[in-house]
Amino acid sequence: MLFPLLPLLITLACALPTVTVGGAALKPYQLRGVQSPIFHLYLQSLPTAKRTPVMGPEATSEYFTIGSSIQSLNSSLFLNIGPGTGKSYLPLSLDTIRNTTAWGLEGDTVITTAASSYGRRKLTILRSCEFSDRGSRLMDRIELNFLACNSATTGYYTLYLQKGSDTPSGQTCSNYQTIHTPCLC
């Protein structure tokens, strides 16, 4: 029944305007969380502090272009990674100046690129092989994670780039979060 409408639905789903940066056309995306507690929350500015990036409700979400930098189409602010404070998480901010050119996509997942100073954290894990007579083996897994902490504003989560297991003291946080585009149309 929907089959005759499929071409129209695909066209409408992918009809967002594109922005050209450095010769490459970039499509603006809402960026969303995919697991609790930020499942189906979207990247945006905190309403009371516009330079603080948070995950919040879809109704107030922003659209972002993603290349080596991430820029809000709504506010023109850039998502930047701040300096460390000796902890294994780094603050994020939304600024008028682009200071971070380490962003990229792996499939639909927002990452910091391997060539950037933030690199890609490799975690070696021990995996047992149930159906193998060779026993356990070491496997490498790449970590592409953010830390999401409850904001003082109900329903919003402050984001940090996660490079370890530290969390801000006095905050309830969920580690190993990922942020995704809704589709790769």
Image (cartoon, rainbow, N blue to C red):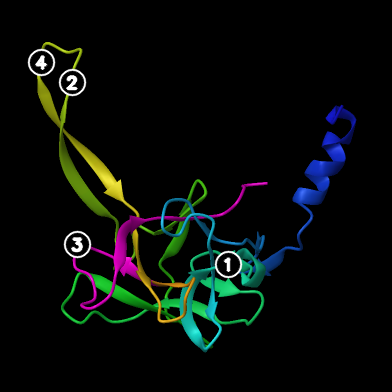
Q: Position of residue 33 (x, y in %)?
A: 48, 57
Q: Which residue is drawn at 31% across and 61% down?
A: 174
Instruction: Name the residue carrying label 1.
Output: 57
- Amino acid type at circle 1 is Pro
Q: Distance between the residues labelled 3 and 1?
A: 26 Å
Q: Position of residue 177 (x, y in %)?
A: 37, 56
Q: Distance between the residues labelled 3 and 4?
A: 32 Å
Of pointers 4 and 2, the one earlier in the residue sequence: 2
- Amino acid type at circle 3 is Ser
Instruction: Name the residue carrying label 2.
Output: 129
Q: Which residue is drawn at 18% across and 17% down?
A: 130
Q: Residue at x 52, y 49 (%)?
A: 108
Magenta stretch in the rendered image: 159-185
The residue nearer to you, when weighing 14 against 42, is 42
Q: Are discs 4 and 2 less than 8 Å apart at CB?
A: yes
- Amino acid type at circle 4 is Arg
For mark 1, give the secondary structure.
loop
Instruction: Name the residue carrying label 4.
Output: 134
Label number found at residue 165: 3
Magenta span contains residue 170: yes
* Label 2 packing within 10 angstroms: few (<14), some (14-19), many (20+): few
Task: Examine the image and state in which quarter residue 157 appears.
Answer: bottom left
**Of circles 3 and 4, which is in front?**
3
